[in-house]
Image (spheres, helix red, strand yellow):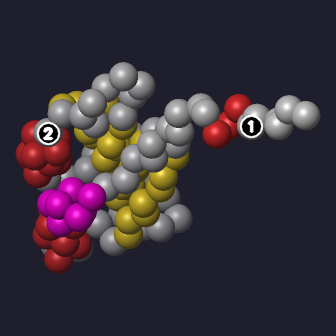
Amino acid sequence: MSQPVLLSDYRPRAGRVFFDRADLMRILSVYSRQVSRGVWRDYAIDHRSNMAMFSIYRRSQEQPLFVITKVQLRGDRDAKYVLQSRNGQLASSRSLKDVLDVLNRQLIAVN
């Protein structure tokens, strides 16, 4: 008698994307400076199957001012970081430092 085979056991599992400790330390360093200035007051971290998002809020009831997204597309070895504001994409790079440099230059969020 033959044994049933589950195809899910043989499918490659998609890797989930997370911010690692170094990423979070860099992001929270920028975030804490703006919190101490009274500009930002809240944040949220979300995860989807191929991306992790760090959203920055002025007030928790509003839409995020900025979203830092770490995306890993199929076939890509390294993740890509994207910085978005309410008005659209501000920066994208394979290096988180490059994206955070753009965020550091954003002194005041425009309403």
> How far is disc 2 from disc 1 in space, using C-alphas?
39 Å
Q: Residues within 10 Å of mark 1 (few under 14, many from 20)?
A: few
Relative height, residue 86 to residue 21 (above, below): above
59 versus 13 height, above or below: below
Residue at the spot of label 1? 6
Going by the numbered disc 1, the residue's amino acid type is Leu
- Residue beneath disc 2: 95
Q: Is residue 65 visible?
A: no
Residue 13 placement, left or right of 98:
right
Task: Check disc 2 and give the amino acid type.
Answer: Ser
The x and y percentages for residue 59 are 42, 67
**Which quadrant, please, contains the N terminus?**
top right
Percent position of residue 106, x then y = 15, 47
Side of 102 where 10 appears, left or right: right
Magenta residue span: 20-27
User: Percent from the top left, x then y, of residue 9?
Assistant: 64, 39
- What kind of element bears circle 2? loop
Can residue 15 be found in the magenta stretch? no
Camera-nearest residue between 54 and 75? 75
Secondary structure mostly seen in the magenta stretch: helix
Return the residue found at the far top.
Answer: 75
Which of the marked residues, 2 or 1, is nearer the chain's N terminus? Answer: 1
Secondary structure beneath dot 1 equals loop
The correct choice, above or below, for 21 with respect to 12 in the image is below
Horizontal relation, residue 14 to residue 31: left or right = right
Residue drawn at 68 percent across, 37 percent down? 8
Residue 37 occupies which quadrant of the picture? bottom left
Q: Is residue 26 magenta?
A: yes
Q: Position of residue 31 (x, y in %)?
A: 22, 65
